Amino acid sequence: MTKAYAAYNRNDRIRFQSSSGGVFHALAASVIEDGGVVFGVRFDDQFRAVYDVAEEVRELEMFQGAKYVFPCMNKVCERVGKYLEEGRRVLFTGLPCHVAGVRAYLRNADTDRLFCVDLVCHGTPENIAWESYMRYEKKRTGKISGVRMRDKSGGWTDYRLVIESKGEEAKSEPARKNLYMRGYTKDLYLRKPCYNCRFRGVERHSDITLGDYWGVSARHRKLDTAGGVSLVLVHSQKGADILEQAGKSLICEETEIEYACSHNPAITDSPDMPRCREHILAQMKKGIDFSQCIEPYIKEKFIVYIREKIRGLKNISKNR
Ligand SMILES: Cc1cc2nc3c(=O)[nH]c(=O)nc-3n(C[C@H](O)[C@H](O)[C@H](O)COP(=O)(O)OP(=O)(O)OC[C@H]3O[C@@H](n4cnc5c(N)ncnc54)[C@H](O)[C@@H]3O)c2cc1C
Ligand code: SF4
């Protein structure tokens, strides 16, 4: 039966670079230190998300931080199989649908040394949306040298999207104001299967599921929650073993599974598909500017934001 934990990395730097509590890094480092390899998702030099492998702890940095982009599998199943045949331990980390794919591909192989970690997954955008957004950013920023989608300099809950370009100051925007993230969180351009995802639920194909533990501070008052806390769902004995092995790097407390899931609808529920989705994607395919494609559909929130600002200014002047 699945057990749930609130956990975060003891190393503040690693935790800061991670989207949630940095539990991924602790699990991955312990597998590598034991002679194994770790698969995860990084950006390539064109900012496409791709699966790759790390054999050294210092390489894990490329996998840290969520990329809200659908990753290319990059012959990953064959590569996992090859490491297993060589007798190596393999930790595969990725989307729930991809973990299911790896498991299905290796169903006749010896998978005693395979560990799978999936993520709580809201959904992934259609590639055309990411490409269209990157074109829009390149026009405004010039040559892009780095993208961070869960920068914590504004805190774990008010995370920022950061675009870096060589020789220029990085452009950093709260995700709640960034066009791409607003379209993503409004579910405007997710891939079709994400609106009816078969891989949600508390029970999974993986050994461990990682997500953000929203609502943690009300339940675990003694934990230092500001820097980000991971929700860790352990589904199997293998999962319990690697969590224990990584334990020295983690602060970890068992938690109530119903409470944690009630604060994180993406574990069990798929979003509704908006009616405007097809139109937005068709506009993007025609090469229409990203902002023009989505602005009509996120205006409502923007108006609410402006109203809140005006209300805030009125309150300040009243209190003077
Ligand atoms: C597309 C997406 C949607 C998510 N939606 C939710 C959600 O709704 N609710 C929630 O609680 N958590 C969600 N998460 C998970 C959360 O953002 C963290 O990734 C997770 O809690 C692990 O955090 P960490 O601090 O342990 O490690 P981090 O360092 O933040 O995570 C790194 C791990 O994420 C993997 N990863 C990064 N981008 C991708 C990608 N595009 N595809 C596959 N794997 C990727 C890396 O390979 C590595 O395994 C989502 C993640 C992604 C990528
Ligand atoms: S929501 Fe489901 S189908 Fe969509 S990327 Fe996530 S796991 Fe895959």
Image (tube, grey):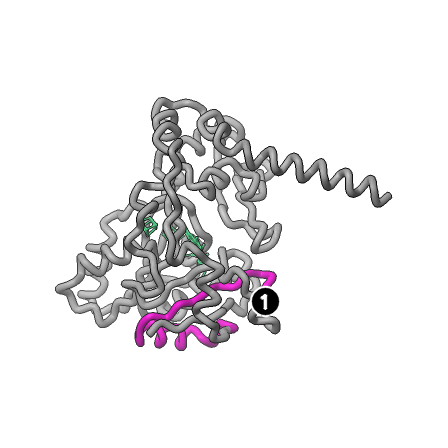
> How many callouts does the rendering have?
1
Image quarter hosting the N terminus: bottom left
Task: Tell me: 66 left or right of 299.
Answer: left
Q: Quadrant of residue 114?
A: bottom left
Q: Report the span colored magenta.
A: 223-251
Q: Percent position (x, y) of residue 93? A: 34, 59
Task: Tell me: 230 left or right of 102.
Answer: right
Residue 151 to residue 286: above or below: below
Q: Percent position (x, y) of residue 207? A: 32, 68
Residue 48 to residue 246: above or below: above
Which residue matches tag 1? 218
Tell me if residue 96 can be seen: yes
Name the one closer to the observer, 297 or 81. 297
Task: Tell me: 286 left or right of 101.
Answer: right
Name the one closer to the observer, 86 or 260. 260
Q: Secondary structure at mark 1?
A: helix
Q: Quadrant of residue 94?
A: bottom left
Tell me if residue 130 can be seen: no
- What residue sits 60% from the left and 51% below the top? 153
Q: Percent position (x, y) of residue 104? A: 19, 58
Q: Residues within 10 Å of mark 1 (few under 14, many from 20)?
A: few
Image quarter hosting the C terminus: top right
Does the magenta-highlighted stretch encompass residue 229?
A: yes
The amino acid beneath tag 1 is Ala
Does the magenta-highlighted stretch encompass residue 96?
A: no
Q: Percent position (x, y) of residue 132? A: 41, 31
Name the one closer to the observer, 190 or 65. 190
